[in-house]
Image (cartoon, rainbow, N blue to C red):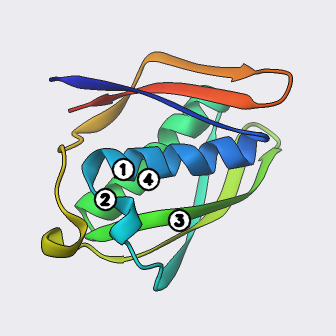
Amino acid sequence: MTDAFVEAWGPTMERAFAQAGIALFETMMYTDKITPRNSEDITVEGHDEEELLYNFLETLLLKFEIDGKALGKFGVHVINQGRDSLNLTGTANGEPYDPEKHGRKIEVKGVTYHQMAIQRERDRVLLRFLLDL
């Protein structure tokens, strides 16, 4: 397996992004085993919605790879249009990664733009993205 195609959705763009964060971590570990002990502020920007999603997921992946964070609960508070870009602010909750507690499913090497799509439907926002495994 070299890629994972992921769909995440929510009633708003903010909720859909939060679900995308959960989907990313669920690909790598068992998120139901994560205790939300610590909270971190997340701030990203992008020139369009796809770049914003990419930057959000890459930021979360780096929190795992560099900082050793197991994140399982996300609150995306605001996505707004800035002067030249879209801005996202939110929080990520979790604890230090422990392979014995959280398990280890599949290593995610990165997020890609390939097949990335954001669809606004009548009652939900659907996000599609590909993870390089």
Give x and y (percent) for residue 61: 35, 52
Query: Mark 4 = which residue?
Result: 59
Cα separation, mark 1 vs mark 3, equals 11 Å
Question: CB under 8 Å between callouts 2 and 1?
Answer: yes
Mark 1 or 4: in front is 1
Label 4: few (<14), some or many (≥20) within 10 Å? some
The answer to whether 105 appears left or right of 48 in the picture is: left
Query: Mark 3 = which residue?
Result: 73
Amino acid bearing label 2: Tyr
Cα separation, mark 1 vs mark 4, equals 16 Å
Identify the secondary structure beneath mark 3: strand
Amino acid bearing label 4: Thr
Amino acid bearing label 1: Glu
Q: Residue at x 25, y 70 (%)?
A: 68
Label 3: few (<14), some or many (≥20) within 10 Å? many
The answer to whether 54 appears left or right of 48 in the picture is: left
Mark 4 or 2: in front is 2
Query: Mark 1 = which residue?
Result: 26
Q: Earlier in the sequence, mark 1 or mark 3?
A: 1
**Which quadrant holds the C terminus?**
top left
